């Protein structure tokens, strides 16, 4: 099912670790009353107060800060978003979150803001991704690093298995046959495993996107997609 939302670029900066910040996170996660906090099993419901407490118990502020500083590019390390569709999605990520709009409107900022929230989940497989061109480049044959035992660490396998994948800026460069094949393999495998992916692009969903990635990738992206249109001026221009 598709949902669409027009958003303006607004962000509020609250000090990491401050009470105001925690209140802000709780408010944005729409914390509900404690009587609806448990699933049928023993795990607290995703997004509930009990769930949030569990997350906070698992990851303290210093650990989270360190994770953010290693996983998020410096420009976006303080990124926050108040877009309710995006925040709802990251609370319970499913399918593809497709963030699109003109240059400089804040698509990458919003993507990393969501990754920052997601990094509160303490899990070595929590996140992978970045700018799609350099991300896929590191997967090219011959660029895959070896671990100490000489066994190849395949980033493509990691990209398939990570709990959240970010493919930033699809459409900014031409995709070669190898890139398309790799992209298809990753997205198809994640689609089969019901694993969520954030994709940002200058391309509106539609013909241009299909022309770029082809029917098979576009179809998988569309099936369980949430669309966010980011509008506004180019923030890079004074
Ligand atoms: N909500 C925001 N609050 C503060 N700064 C922002 C916000 N959104 C974007 N910016 C800043 O504006 C600049 C452009 O944002 P961003 O890189 O996210 O644009 P983009 O839409 O991804 O552009 P492109 O299409 O060229 O990739 C960056 O310096 C970013 O840090
Ligand atoms: Mg960008």
Image (cartoon, grey):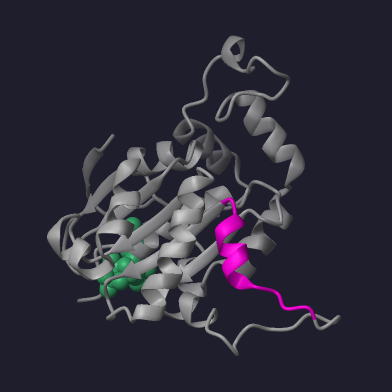
Answer yes or no: is residue 51 visible: yes
Q: Nearer the viewer, residue 118 or 168?
A: 168
- Left or right side of 10 for 44: right
> Is residue 157 rendered magenta in the image?
yes
Q: Where residue 201 sits in the image (x, y, percent)?
A: 28, 64
Residue lying at 68% horizontally and 38% vertically, measured from the top left: 55
Q: Residue at x 41, y 36 (%)?
A: 88
Quadrant into which the C terminus falls: bottom left
Against 86, residue 174 (above or below) is below
Residue 104, position as x, y percentages in the image: 25, 69
Magenta region includes residue 236: no
Looking at the image, residue 232 sits to the left or right of residue 136; the answer is left
Q: Give the percent coordinates (x, y) of residue 142.
A: 60, 90
**Displayed-image quarter of ligand 1:** bottom left
- Tell me if residue 79 can be seen: no
* Quarter-of-image position of residue 57: top right
Q: Quadrant of residue 237?
A: bottom left
Q: What x and y, as percent, mark residue 181? A: 41, 71
Q: Taking 201 as reference, is 33 left or right?
A: right
195 in relation to 70, above or below:
above
Give above or below for 24 relative to 43.
below
Q: Could you tell me which residue is drawn at 41 percent across and 58 percent down?
A: 111
Viewer-proximal residue among 69 and 137: 137
Residue at x 56%, y 63% (from the top left corner): 159
Residue 172 lies, with reference to residue 8, above or below; the image says below
Residue positioned most to the right: 149
Q: Which residues are magenta?
A: 151-163
Residue lying furthest bottom: 142
């Amino acid at each position: 099912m598709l949902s669409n939302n027009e958003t303006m670029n607004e962000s509020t900066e609250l000090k990491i670790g401050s009470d105001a910040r925690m209140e802000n996170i709780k408010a944005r996660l729409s914390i509900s009353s404690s009587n609806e906090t448990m699933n049928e099993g023993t795990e607290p419901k995703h997004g509930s107060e009990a769930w949030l407490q569990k997350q906070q118990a698992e990851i303290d502020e210093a650990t989270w800060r360190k994770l953010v500083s290693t996983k998020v590019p410096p420009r976006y390390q303080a990124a926050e978003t108040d877009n309710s569709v995006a925040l709802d999605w990251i609370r319970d990520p499913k399918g593809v979150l497709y963030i699109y709009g003109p240059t400089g409107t804040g698509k990458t900022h919003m993507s990393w803001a969501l990754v920052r929230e997601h990094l509160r989940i303490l899990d070595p497989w929590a996140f992978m991704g970045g700018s799609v061109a350099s991300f896929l480049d590191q997967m090219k044959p011959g660029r895959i690093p070896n671990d100490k035992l000489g066994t190849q660490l395949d980033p493509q396998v990691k990209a398939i298995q990570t709990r959240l994948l970010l493919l930033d800026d699809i459409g900014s460069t031409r995709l070669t046959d190898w890139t398309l094949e790799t992209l298809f393999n990753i997205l198809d495998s994640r689609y089969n495993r019901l694993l969520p992916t954030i994709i940002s692009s200058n391309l509106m969903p539609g013909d241009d996107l299909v022309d770029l990635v082809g029917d098979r990738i576009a179809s998988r992206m569309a099936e369980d997609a949430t669309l966010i249109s980011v509008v506004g001026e180019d923030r890079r221009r004074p």
